[in-house]
Image (spheres, rainbow, N blue to C red):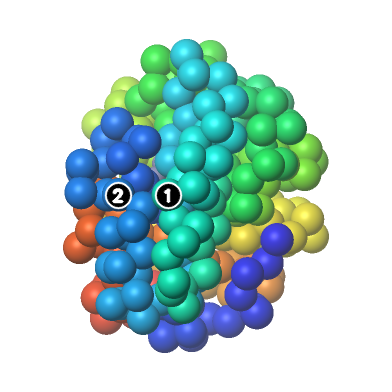
Amino acid sequence: MFLHEKTYDFNELARYNTHMHTTFSHCAKREMKASDIIKAAEKAELEIIALTDHNYPDEHNQVAVQKNILYEQIKDIKTPVKVLIGAELSSYDIGKFADDEVCDNSLDWRLYTTNHFHQGYWVHPEKKTPRAYCEHMLAIMEKVIESGRADAFAHPFMAKYISCFKDFRDVTAAFTDNEIGDIIIKGTEKEITWELNVPAIYGDPDFHRRYFAIGKEVGAVFNIGTDAHKLKDIDTHQFIPDLKRMLD
Ligand SMILES: [Zn+2]
Ligand SMILES: [Zn+2]
């Protein structure tokens, strides 16, 4: 689902923040209550936000249950902010999904991650080389695209959670321009949007400059996701000067 019209103007992109965690995510600060998130988004003059909690392997389909709880918590709040209740879903191996499709489809925003390699249940490629990780990630992404279960990719291509190399950026450097362009085209044909994930960009600006340039060339639809785990990270606008500097 495309939220944005296709735009490469950061001030336009900053109107939406499509990646943040509530207290349902163990890693989020306890201040991340849905009602306070909405207050912070309103103060930041955001038009659309998406709540995207993690799923946990021992809590199969729990994100659908949480969606109903979050909905109850916010349904009486009067706000100009449009709130999508989604999740950061997991495809932890080629063609493997942590939750059922019915669960995914009950969500307003299905943000798929394909690279949470720090999670114990995540499947790694057999060979531990940068190229093997690239091919593995691309194969996972391809199956997610084919499945029609995703609206967006969370921090696509990110290698931060791969710990077997001295520098994880060896992995992102090993993606070819053609691979990046081809997978973006495939995703865009299925109305998948491509995240500009703020912490991922800070951690690997060289790759993300290339990703943004290729994305623009092939007609990607981008969203900014700040991956907020605390209230002060909800406002996208504070990051725009840095994003312009790092990506343009
Ligand atoms: Zn993530
Ligand atoms: Zn996240």
Screen quadrant of the C terminus: bottom left
Q: Residue at x 49, y 47 (%)?
A: 72
Q: Quadrant of residue 77?
A: bottom left
Q: Position of residue 178 (x, y in %)?
A: 65, 56
Residue highlighted by disc 1: 73
Q: Residue at x 42, y 49 (%)?
A: 73
Position of 34 with respect to 74 (left or right) is left
Residue highlighted by disc 2: 33
Quadrant of the rendered image holding ligand 1: top left
Q: Quadrant of residue 106?
A: top right
* C-alpha separation, residue under disc 1 versus residue under disc 2: 9 Å
Position of 10 with respect to 4 (left or right) is left
Q: Quadrant of residue 233?
A: bottom left
Mark 1 or mark 2, earlier in chain: 2
Residue 154 visible to the viewer: no
Q: Residue at x 33, y 57 (%)?
A: 35
Tell me the amino acid under the disc marked 2.
Lys
Does the residue at mark 1 contact the one at mark 2 (Cβ under 8 Å)? yes
Q: Position of residue 52 (x, y in %)?
A: 46, 47
Q: Position of residue 240 (x, y in %)?
A: 31, 78
Tell me the amino acid under the disc marked 1.
Gln
